[in-house]
Amino acid sequence: MAELHCHIEGAADPALVLELAERNGIDLGGIIRDGAYVWHDFTSFLAAYDRASTVFQSADDFARLAEDHLTRLADAGTIHAEFFISPDHAEAGGTAPQAYLAGLAEGVRRARHATGIEARMIVVGVRHLGAGRVEAAARFAVAGAMSEPLLTGFGLAGDERSFAPRDFAKAFDIARDAGLGLTAHAGELRGADSVRDTIAALKPQRIGHGVRAIEDDDLVRRIAADGIVLEVCPGSNLALGIFPDAAAHPLRRLVEAGVKVTLNADDPPFFATDLAAEYRFAADAGIGRAGLLALTRNAIEAAFVDPATRQRLLDRLVRDAISLGAPPSRH
Ligand code: ADE
Ligand code: ZN
């Protein structure tokens, strides 16, 4: 497995959040009940997410968060994981963005050393905070990438109902000019027009979600023809009610239309999911073993990594597939 779309604060295990809230003396305001996050719609989800993120208050706390997240993924068989980091969330919790980046990078290195998992970080701007904040996030990404090689991308997250894609064109130009990989959330809370406008205005290589492109056949054909990669997060979509049930989710239709689809958990404990569950969802949707392998290959081919790392990951994918597919040895 490989993952391209996960928000690091959204990956925080509720037990870790409770522990740090106690230690750092933070009132969580009831966002965790019986060991699970509590929210009821996208707005209250974002509020719970924002509040949980404030318990992380030092580089060390963020190192622990990244290490915990990546170790869990590696234990489940993940060979590469990219995650979104948000300087705005670091500041809201009182951590300077530079310390945030350094702490997360330390966590990546610890997990990589212990498990062999590869990982990269993507700075996101939060769109409902406005174009100015998103441009500041882009400038932080560019400066951060100069000192931290694990930072390789820039993206746009937050409430898609706020502002228009073109409002963020300058931020994407700043990141593109510095050679960062680009991804933008679209087609989650809004429909096909949002995906089309995002592609036109921001020219990202990847779209976060993009699933509501399914509302427009022409757009789906164009996404497939142009090789734009969709970071599909079925568990998130179902939890947030973007689609009423598994049968209505367009994952399989997008794959069959020739779109380069990847599987992702988005904010796993918020949506009671993880990457393995997303692969089970795909299998239940009728995607066979070769198809699942192709989804992982799509992720590695679209990863924001250097060519040598990509080749190493592809080699590992082939090796793992052969060893998993081989008949059991007799001992
Ligand atoms: N930030 C965290 N999770 C998100 C999601 N699913 N959509 C937009 N912004 C997010
Ligand atoms: Zn997301």
Image: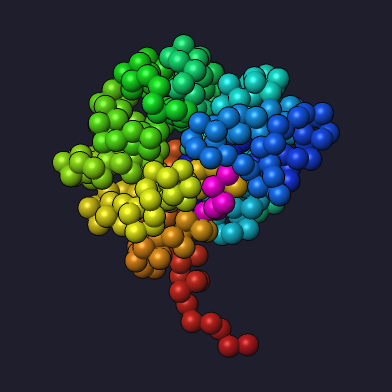
Q: Quadrant of the C terminus?
A: bottom right
Nearer the observer, 253 or 44: 44
Side of 213 relative to 127 (left or right): left
Residue 274 within the magenta-colored segment of the rendering: yes
Magenta-tinted stretch: 270-275
Foreground of the two, 238 or 312: 238
Q: Where is residue 76 in the image (x, y as percent from the top left)?
A: 59, 59
Residue at 29 percent across and 30 percent down: it is 194
Residue at point 52%, 28% (across, down): 123
140 magenta-colored: no
Looking at the picture, does residue 173 appear above or below residue 75?
above
Which residue is depicted at the point 33% across and 20% down? 164
The x and y percentages for residue 104 are 65, 34
Q: Where is residue 191 in the image (x, y as percent from the top left)?
A: 29, 35
Up-down relation of residue 182 to residue 108 (above or below) = above
Q: Which residue lies furthest to the left in this view?
A: 218
